[in-house]
Each structure stands twice: as C-alpha cells, then as structure tokens.
Amino acid sequence: MSLADNLEKVLARRASIEEALSSGDISSEMLTKLSMELAELRPVADQAQKVRRLQADLASARQMIAEAGGDADIIAMAEEEIDEISAALPDEENTLQLLLLPKDKDDSRNAILEVRAGTGGDEAALFAADLFGMYQRYAARQGWKFEVMEISEIGIGGYKEATANISGAEVFARLKFESGVHRVQRVPETEGGGRIHTSAATVAVLPEVEEVDIEINEADLRVDVFRASGPGGQSVNTTDSAVRITHLPTGIVVSQQDEKSQHKNRAKAMKILRARIYDAERARQDAERAASRKGQVGSGDRSERIRTYNFPQGRVTDHRINLTLYKLERIIAGEALDELVDALNTEDRAAKLAQAADDNAS
C-alpha cells in the first residue's frame, strides 16, 4: 500500500471513530475501546494532515508558476516556496511512514527479565550479577518498578541465574533487544597473572502476559513441591514451600522458592511459565517473518552473541549494529544504556521502513 493510500486510510478511520463517539449510541465497553484507538491514531492522523497540507501547498506553488504569465516576482516567490517545501516534505513523509509502521503488539507490556551465567565459571556468574544490577539501575532511572523474583547465588557475589519482573511505561519496547548472549572480557579478581578472561551470560527479556492472553491446561502441568534451600544447599525453610512446574507439551520448567508461601511461589512460577510459553510462540513467529530479512535486529536468537563488554579498553560493542561506545562504566551503571537502546530501536525502525518500501515496490 502506498503512502497516499495509507494516509487516506488513517484519516478515514479517524473520521469514522469521531463520528461513532459523537453519536453517543455505543456501549461503555466500545466507548473505551474506540477512545483508546483514537488516542493512538491521533498523532498519526495529525502527521498525515501535515503531509497532505505540504503536498497541497507544493501543488499550489507549481500551479502559481504555470499561471504566472511570465511575472518574474510571482515566479521567484513560488520557486522559493517550492524549495522550502521540497526540503521539508521528505522528512515529514519519513516521519509519517514511521508512525504508520505496524507496532509490536507487546511493546506496551511489562517484562520478565532473566539473566543466566554462561561459559566462564565464577567469572560468568559475577558478570551475570553485574548485568542484573545494570538493568535494575536502568529501571530505576526510567521510573520503572523492578521486583526481584528469584536469585540463585554462588556465594561470592555472583548469580547462576536471576529473574525480575519489570513494570512501567513501554518496558518491553525498550528492553526487547537486550535478549541474547552478552560477552565480557576482563581480568578476574582471582587472576594473579593479569590475564584477560572471556566469559558470557545470557539475557532473556520476555513480555509479561496475563491468564487471558494465554490459556494453560492444568492437565498439561506437573507440579512438584520441595523444601527451599539457600546458597550451598543449606535449608532456609522448614516446609515444602518451593515449587517446580513443568509444562509437559513444551518441556519448559520453572522453579520458585523465594517466598515462604507455596501459594505465592506457585503464582510467581505460573507468571514466568506463561511468559516463557508466550515468548516461545512469539520467537517462532518472528523467525518465520525474519526468514527473508537477514540481519534483523529483533531476531530474538538468544544463542547469538549480541554484545561485548571489554573492561581493559572501557568499551562496549553491540555486534548487531556495529556500534562501539567507550562508556563501559556508565553503561554498567545504567546511565548510558539508553544510547544502545535508542540505537537498536532506530536500526529496527529503519529496517522496517526499508522492508515496507520493498513491499510497496513489489
């Protein structure tokens, strides 16, 4: 569909919604639904009208030259207007194209963050803890709520794995490109020879889903309860409050033991389970869509090395977009992570624009 066709479609839909809302003959449920759609549509429609106005002004200026009868002053004035509009119009049309891009339906969702130590032993676990702390500090700077759901420690400050629920405005939209293998290059504190070691941790950012979003059959679940334990295996609870849930059709296993209540642990485990099942289906659909789009930022492949944190050089490199920032300490502190997040989102929008242009041309 061309830009002109999209423009007409947007303006027609806004007019249709406004007419329905002004009629007053709709249910409260439909009123809420249409009001939300209008709020989402308004900036797109406003930009569409701006583009249409510029296009009309450009046509009018050209018509003025055609009817000037050789009047140099009129022609000069019209040509100046044409130059101004011609310089501004491509940017305004590009802005409209971006607004018209189909939105990720999960962008407005909260997220489940999972960080796991990968290759590298204790150093990988220490790096996993650093990453988890980075996202916690970043969430605080964004005004998001960061609820730690479970942490499995190794005893020296490292994490074998850690899970958190992050809630706030556009959480998944901002963090969805963080999924993947994060690699670290640094000299471990235990390394006497000063040699640089390489280790890794895996990050998964899952859109949080509700029971109404995904239905899980209780018959497909195996629930085991056991006594919670702390680092090193020592008992921290005298009752069987820890919960392990296995989703038999997919083989996904979730454990929770942070709460003293079995009921609360089960509720937390189900929240993570729903997110993982939903994410697996989302990843499958993304893979199908990305089959013809090599290098897509949002491939979601967590086996792919996406970023390297080089401590000796103080740099962070995102390999998907070939961006290197010499701001490692500020990124780990959560202060400069926005620069990576913004660059990844910009690259994704550019790729989608290019794809839309190819689709329109074919």
Image: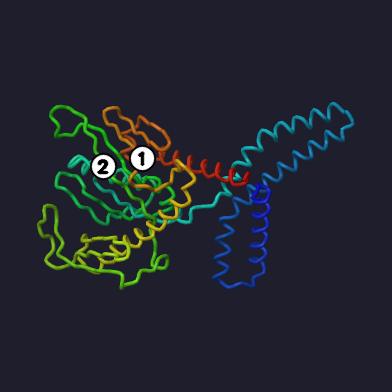
Colour logic: rainbow
Residue occupying image coordinates x 67% and y 45%:
50
Residue 240's place in the image compared with 102, above or below, is below
10 Å crowding of disc 1: few (<14), some (14-19), many (20+)? many
Disc on the earlier residue, 2 or 1: 2
Q: Position of residue 292 (x, y in %)?
A: 49, 46
Q: What is the x, y in percent for residue 288?
A: 46, 52
Question: In the image as oriented, which residue stretches furthest toward the left?
Answer: 234
Label number found at residue 225: none
Q: What amino acid type is highlighted by mark number 1?
A: Ile
To which quarter of the image does residue 178 belong? top left
Amino acid identity at mark 2: Asp
Q: How many neighbours does mark 2 have within 10 angstroms: few (below 14), some (14-19), or many (20 or more)? A: some
Q: Secondary structure at mark 1?
A: strand
Q: Which residue is mark 1?
A: 306
Decide which of 335, 242 is in the foreground and name it.
Answer: 242
Name the mark on residue 130. Answer: 2
Residue at 55% x, 61% y: name it: 36
| Residue 79 image position (x, y, % from top left) | 77, 30
**In which image quadrant can residue 310 be found?**
top left
Q: Nearer the viewer, residue 43 or 297?
A: 297
Position of residue 334 relative to residue 212, above or below, is above
Which is in the foreground here, disc 2 or disc 1? 1
Q: Circle 2 — which element?
A: helix
217 relative to 83, above or below: below
Query: Residue sitting at 26 percent across and 42 percent down?
Result: 130
Tell whether 256 sits left or right of 106: left
- Is residue 271 shown left or right of residue 32? left
